[in-house]
Amino acid sequence: MESQEENSENEIIMGMLRNFEYEMDQEDATSELSQEHPDATMDESDDEIPEAINIQSPEMDDNGILLSLATPANAKTWNWILGGNQKVRTPFANVSAGWTIELPEDAKEMDFWKLTFPDRILSEVVKESNDYAIHVMENADSLSRRQQKFQAVSYDEFLRYLAVRIIMRIDQKPEMAMYWSKDPILGSIVVRDILSSDRFYEIQRYLHLSDTETPNESDKIFKIRKLWDLTMNNFQNLVVPNDFLSVDESLVKSRARIKFKQFIPTKRNRFGVKTFSLVDERTGFIVNSVIYEGKAMSAENQTVSAADKKQFGHGGGIVLQLCQPYLGEFRTIFADNYFNSPNLAEKLLKENTYLCGTLRSGRLNAPKPPKGMKRGDLEVRHDEQDAEIMVEFWRDKGVVKMISTGFEHALVETNNAAGAPKQKLKTIIEYNNYARGIDRADQMMGLYDTGRKTMKWYL
């Protein structure tokens, strides 16, 4: 026991000596380098770092922005001075904003369905499914009797399959087979009349959304990429966004065994596929959306470029990507503190687009909240160079931090939950009114979730 303790003490002492020697070498190297090249900095990759040294990584916020990033020589100098923003908002003036196709007053739900998912998109799914069925049978050692009698899926049959899946969500049963049961209590006459059980399982087995011949294995969502892109393009053709847009994340419920499945404990579903969506707040319609595939992504499938991520963080890069088709017309983007930063506000202003939302502490170039604020205290600052960029600190139950370029600073009379009069920041009221689009979409998806346990993660 004593020898073991002595050995451990010796190892600790040797580790401390290695640390000291390494630090001295680094100081000598740094001083020599600074004498020859005053503007140069040491590259840690040039020297081998002993294992005994605990090198701490730079502090980053949740968006991946360095909290203590050195400011380049040609970068803007931020100087936050007291006072609200000093410029007048330019009004949104796109007279063509709104729905591009008008439905008649007697239109039914099916009419809107056909606009949202037109024949050209669903026909592509039918084609890929039939191609996949042929591919499976051609590569099989032997064919079952059912496979020998297989007939190509028609467009009408595919619509019937989708109808059955929707009914299964409304009339839930413990097992799929029960829908075709002849028992009058357990079975569903409607489902039996729409599609036979054999044909339903056959369509589901060969349902495919991607090109079987040329799969892109580097793309984690290549199995749904084609359908996703076609759908997003159609959504953008249906609506010209109005003046107010919101960006937020959503979690599509999924228990599938996929690498990009996310766990978010604050969400109701907790497990699922995370998406970032842009919503037109006047219509409540999603006009653009991307799927988060995780950090380990190939360069061609990166949601946010490395340059944007470094300057605006991952959240800010998402905002720029989603809003790219709609910049330059003085729209207002509402987003929460995951996305917002002074750098993003400055970038959007240059693109004639406003920003409003909450601001997270520690964002790069953001002012620090005053210390010792008491309930009701308020402090407003704006950037000296870009007077439209305003940050407000207001102490309620906690310190509320808002960043805005589209609204002036003002306190508005309103009522609290009990009906008592109360003053609130105008930016908070506007944010609460127009940053809820994705919440409505989540509510609709929760009510009409058609997911069932299958071998295919996208079903």
Image (cartoon, grey):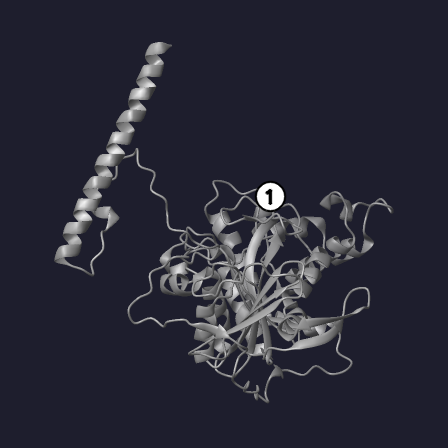
Relative to the observer, which residue lies in front, 283 or 76? 76
- Location of residue 419 with respect to 224 vertically, above or below: below
- SS of the residue under disc 1: helix
Relative to the observer, which residue lies in front, 195 or 304? 304
Does residue 48 appear anywhere in the picture? no
Q: Is residue 275 left or right of residue 3?
A: right
Q: Residue 47: percent from the left, percent from the top? A: 21, 43
Please tell me which residue is depicted at 45% across the width and 65% down the height of the picture. Answer: 317
Q: Residues within 10 Å of mark 1 (few under 14, many from 20)?
A: few
Q: Is residue 398 left or right of residue 33?
A: right
Residue labelled with disc 1: 145
Residue 335 lies in quadrant: bottom right
| Residue, far right | 184
Q: Residue 124: percent from the left, percent from the top? A: 54, 65
Residue 351 lies in quadrant: bottom left
In the rendered structure, which amino acid carries the disc numbered 1?
Arg
Does residue 326 appear anywhere in the picture? yes
Total number of numbered discs in the rendering: 1
Quadrant containing the N terminus in the rendered view: top left
Q: Is residue 298 left or right of residue 293?
A: left
Q: Residue 445: percent from the left, percent from the top? A: 68, 59
Q: Is residue 270 left or right of residue 362?
A: right
Relative to the observer, which residue lies in front, 133 or 151? 133
Q: Residue 282: percent from the left, percent from the top? A: 66, 77
Relative to the observer, which residue lies in front, 270 or 444? 270
